Image: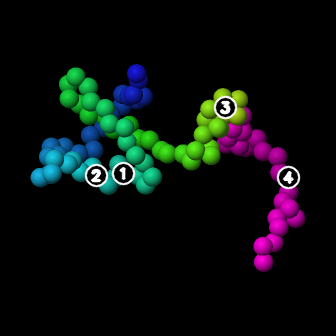
Amino acid sequence: MTIIKDNNLKIIAESVKPDSKKRVVLPKSVIKDGITYHIYINSYDQIILDPQVIIPLSELWVFENKDILASIDKGMAESANGQVVKRGSFAEYIENEA
């Protein structure tokens, strides 16, 4: 299992001690909203936090279908490279809910 995807590590805090309830508080600079963590420990007792996001079950099919995911990735890359086609306004297709 490969967890460390980049060996360019940097120290974000030094000599952090667990509190009275044995919790280690992470600096605010590394915590992002909506992120959970898988926690790993190796034979040297080094702890690795691997950030995770949770997706809705209704969107899981995208990640399970490699063709769809490849198509989305291709479209995102094309958009990032400025390869877009302007199709004008789609306002006429919006139903007014007023």
Residue at label 3?
A: 65
Three-letter residue code for mark 3: Asn
The reply to whether callout 4 and callout 2 are in contact (CB within 8 Å) is: no
Secondary structure state at the residue bearing disc 2: loop
* Residue type indicated by callout 4: Arg
Choose mark 3 or mark 4, whichever is in front: 3
Crowd rating for badge 3 (residues with CA inside 10 Å; few <14, some 14–19, many 20+): few
The magenta span reads 70-98
Q: Are marks 2 and 1 in contact (CB under 8 Å)?
A: yes
Sequence-wise, the earlier of marks 3 and 4 is: 3
Disc on the earlier residue, 2 or 3: 2
Look at mark 1 in the image and give the residue it sits on: 31
**Quadrant of the drawing holding the C terminus:** bottom right
Task: Please give left or right for residue 75 compared with residue 93 in the image.
Answer: left
Kind of residue at disc 1: Ile
Task: Tell whether 39 sits left or right of 96.
Answer: left
The answer for how far apart the CA atoms under marks 2 and 3 are is 37 Å
Q: Residues within 10 Å of mark 1 (few under 14, many from 20)?
A: few
**In-front residue for pair 59/45:** 59
Judge by depth and name the residue closer to the eye, 87 or 54.
54
Q: How far apart are the two marked residues, 3 and 4, measured between alpha carbons? A: 28 Å
